[in-house]
Amino acid sequence: MLETDGIPPRLNNQVCEEILCQQYCYRGQLQQDVDVLLLKVNGGWHQLYFDEGIVFWRLQTEQPKALEAQPGDPMTYPLIDMGEKYALKQSVISDYITEPLLGGARVSFVFEGKGSLIVVHKNNRTLLRFLSDRVGV
């Protein structure tokens, strides 16, 4: 059964102004494709993250900033601009689906004429994939 903590935002048929992905690295090695996914819609930021198969949604009042690593800290949290990487800025989110998986959940964002950004959280690992609608991309 799918468990959600927080109120999922209304994203269908909304313009995605920005989409950022905070990753988690340990000693320079990527551990989580997605630590937190941040979407800006209607001027507001929404956080999506997972823990133990639970989908969490939170509002964020400020522009996200990359976390600064302290000297000697083995953990880093790079902030990747998915809107730029996949040309999703100012694209319409035509559909947004959250589905339960055995041991986790999948959240899919379908961008009109662009493709789908899919976040899979399973067995406490989170992966991100982009499937383009365009042939040869």
Image: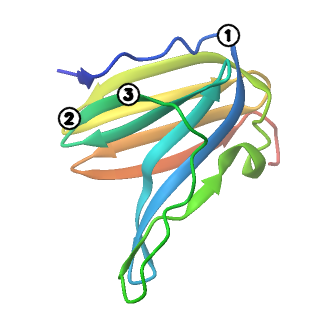
Mark toward the viewer: 1 or 2:
1
Residue in view at x 57 percent, y 46 percent: 64
- Residue at left 25%, top 37%? 104
- Where residue 105 sits in the image (x, y, percent)? 31, 33
The residue at 59%/15% (across/down) is: 95
Callout 3: few (<14), some (14-19), or many (20+) C-alpha neighbours within 10 Å? many
Q: What kind of residue is marked 2? A: Leu
Residue type (three-letter) at the residue carrying disc 1:
Asn
Q: Disc 1 marks which residue?
A: 13
Residue 102's label in the rendered image is: 2
Q: Residue furthest bottom?
A: 72
Q: Is residue 7 above or below residue 26?
A: above
Give the alpha-carbon distance from disc 1 to disc 2, as whole Å: 29 Å
Residue at the spot of label 3: 57
Q: Position of residue 44 (x, y in %)?
A: 60, 24
Residue 116 found in image quarter: top right
Q: Quadrant of residue 107?
A: top left
Report the residue at 54% width, 64% height from top: 78
Instruction: Calculate the distance from the C-alpha at mark 1 to the C-alpha at mark 3.
Output: 19 Å
